[in-house]
Image: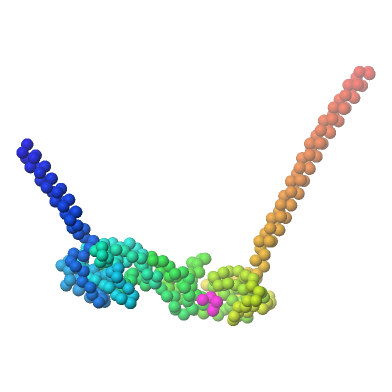
């Protein structure tokens, strides 16, 4: 019995100690183990980071160099200290909050991104003010920005087809944009400059007729508002001779001038479709009327035959009575 009481007392004392430690604010491993030290900058290379970590912290894996909530572009506030590393969510970067004495996550800035989780104690190529990866600028020859990406994805680029630039490597069917690291742009010279231009899918098409233009990143010609002009672009109507056809690179199937032409009449396609629907409706009504007439005719013919047969039967009976 005494053994049981002693065991209960030990358990009770352990629980008391845990409660006291909890309410006394013992560190849970998220804050610095000592007072953070303000520094002018962090180690400038991965090698320097590792070597400096061995000097500052007993366990080099606990070394952190971070910006704080007081950090600004024109007034840096960077600290270094030792604490247990944490996994930072994708699209975010770590920051140390001096007031809360805690590690925080903040979103990547506009020109940077982070596609995966990463430990808070890792060296970052673009310094601790930014997320690990810098977004592409799409500033190579003939390139423009297609999509600005997000905190987890890079920007995508496209070739300035208005200036006859096309991707050097083929894109997937229906694709218009690409990653900067996957492609480059070069000039395409096989379109007839007098009659043709490139569309957003990098194909030679006939220029729009007078009063129409093809907006950037659109396939069809649209009506040009009155009183506006397009600088540097041909807006007068041109007639393309039948014997002039665009030459096509070996990587793309040959297409005729007629096939390549994107006509502005496509703007009236909706009206044409309405006319076609109306014609189909009239045709269906005519067919239904014809079928109805045939059915009624068959019905009347059958009634007439029955009436005739009945009349003949009555005449035959009258003849039998007379005889």
Residue at left 58%, top 72%? 215
**Residue at the right extreme of this rendering:** 322
Which residue is drawn at the image coordinates 67% and 67% (left, top)? 265
Q: Is residue 182 magenta?
A: no
Query: Would you place residue 305 above or below residue 162 in this image?
Result: above
Look at the image and say whether residue 162 sits in the magenta stretch: yes
- Magenta stretch bounds: 160-164
Q: Is residue 310 left or right of residue 246?
A: right
Q: Position of residue 238 (x, y in %)?
A: 67, 78
Q: How many marks?
A: 0
Locate residue 179: give its quadrant.
Answer: bottom left
Name the side, left or right, on which 189 lies relative to 111.
right
The reply, left or right, for residue 66 in relation to residue 222 is left
The quarter of the picture where the N terminus appears is top left
Question: Residue at the location (55% across, 77% down)?
Answer: 162
Of helix, strand and loop, which mostly describes the magenta segment?
helix
**Most foreground residue, 218 or 301:** 218
Q: Is residue 160 visible?
A: yes
Q: Nearer the viewer, residue 160 or 258?
A: 160
Residue at the image point whose x is 28% and y is 62% from the top: 87
């Amino acid at each position: 019995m005494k053994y049981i009481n002693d065991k209960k007392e030990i358990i009770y004392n352990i629980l008391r100690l845990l409660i006291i430690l909890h309410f006394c604010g013992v560190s849970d491993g998220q804050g610095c183990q000592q007072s953070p030290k303000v520094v002018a900058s962090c180690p400038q290379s991965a090698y320097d980071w590792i070597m400096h970590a061995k000097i500052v912290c007993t366990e080099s894996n606990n070394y952190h160099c971070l910006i704080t909530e007081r950090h600004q572009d024109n007034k840096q506030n960077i600290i270094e200290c030792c604490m247990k590393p944490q996994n930072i969510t994708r699209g975010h970067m770590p920051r140390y909050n001096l007031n809360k004495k805690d590690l925080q996550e903040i979103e990547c800035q506009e020109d940077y991104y982070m596609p995966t989780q990463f430990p808070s104690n890792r060296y970052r190529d673009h310094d601790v003010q930014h997320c690990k990866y810098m977004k592409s600028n799409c500033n190579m020859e003939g390139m423009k920005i297609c999509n600005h990406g997000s905190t987890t994805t890079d920007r995508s680029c496209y070739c300035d087809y208005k200036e006859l630039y096309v991707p050097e490597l083929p894109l997937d069917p229906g694709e218009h944009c690409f990653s900067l690291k996957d492609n480059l742009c070069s000039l395409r010279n096989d379109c007839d400059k007098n009659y043709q231009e490139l569309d957003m899918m990098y194909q030679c098409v006939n220029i729009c007729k007078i009063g129409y233009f093809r907006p950037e990143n659109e396939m069809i010609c649209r009506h040009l508002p009155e009183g506006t002009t397009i600088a540097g672009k041909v807006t007068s109507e041109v007639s393309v001779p039948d014997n002039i056809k665009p030459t096509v690179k070996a990587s793309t199937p040959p297409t005729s001038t007629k096939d390549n032409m994107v006509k502005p009449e496509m703007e009236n396609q909706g009206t044409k479709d309405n006319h076609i629907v109306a014609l189909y409706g009239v045709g269906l009504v005519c067919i239904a009327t014809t079928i109805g007439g045939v059915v009624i005719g068959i019905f009347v013919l059958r009634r007439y035959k029955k009436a005739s047969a009945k009349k003949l039967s009555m005449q035959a009976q009258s003849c039998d009575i007379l005889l």
